[in-house]
Amino acid sequence: MKAMSQVYFTFHADLDYFLPLKRRDTVIHLNFRGNQSVKHLIESLGVPHTEVGKILANGRLISLNHITRDGDQIEVHPPAPGCPLKPRFLLDNHLGKLAAYLRMLGFDCLYHNTYQDDELAGLVHQEERILLSRDRRLLMRKVVVHGYCPRSLEPGEQLGEVIRRFDLAGKITPFRRCLRCNHPLEPVSKQAVLHRLEPLTKKYFDEFHLCPACNQVYWKGSHYERMQKLITGLEKK
């Protein structure tokens, strides 16, 4: 049997979120046998590789594929804010409200409440999307290159997290996508949808958009005002 090796991990910033309470804000001593990548050891502690940015071993920059050696002192930092891809997201079936919020801000968000883990892993790989999920094991799959685990359970706070993590504040183009199916909206004349409108909507609104995929009609009603407040709040943070 191969001798036991030991490595010393320090996790920085909010990566402590993924660690048990007793292992937060401290150097973690981890024993292992054989040749283990730093990715494997980091994820064995509960931190998905999608949450990892710069890694240092004994003060030297390394990659996730680095084979850990006995006595290595490893520092793990979260990624710097920024979007590694075009901001196109895939959300698991527990983040429906967040998907709606991101669509309201104009971001391409693939979401369906029946997606299974294998489907999500396949789609994020095939379509080169960023996976948003609170399922750590899903984020740890090798095919998931880019992803994020929202810390909060509250959709408005989750939205703020995603905006900050991927530095999206300057890319917001509100009310350009269908909240139901994610398809880009198109302007439509009031006359063309008049027969579908309620009396008060006919009276007070003149600007309308239509989803050509699912035929949903949109106008700047109460949801528009709520999102404007939400956007204003995000900009102030």
Image: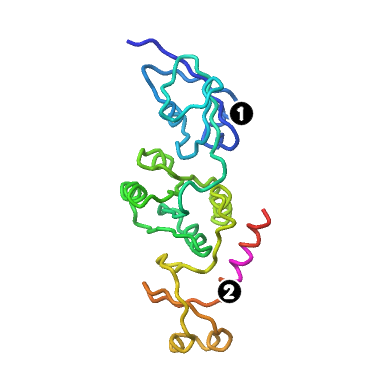
How much space separates mark 2 and mark 1, taking CA atoms? 45 Å
Q: Position of residue 44 (x, y in %)?
A: 43, 29
Q: Which residue is mark 2?
A: 222
Question: Whole-percent x and y of residue 213?
Answer: 36, 72
The secondary structure making up most of the magenta span is helix
Residue at 44% in and 60% down: 108
Is residue 140 shown above or below 129? above
Percent across and percent down for residue 227 are: 58, 66
Q: Quadrant for the N terminus, please.
A: top left
Q: Secondary structure at mark 2?
A: helix
Pick the residue in front: 60 or 32: 60
- Please state which amino acid type lies under the numbered disc 2: Ser
Q: Amino acid at mark 1?
A: Asp
Mark 1 lies on residue: 25
Q: Is residue 19 above or below residue 139?
A: above
Which of the marked residues, 2 or 1, is nearer the chain's N terminus? 1
The kind of secondary structure element at disc 1 is loop
Is residue 227 covered in magenta? Answer: yes
- The stretch of residues the image draws in magenta is 225-230
| Residue at (52% x, 69% y) in the render | 175
Left/right placement of residue 123 relative to residue 99 reads: left
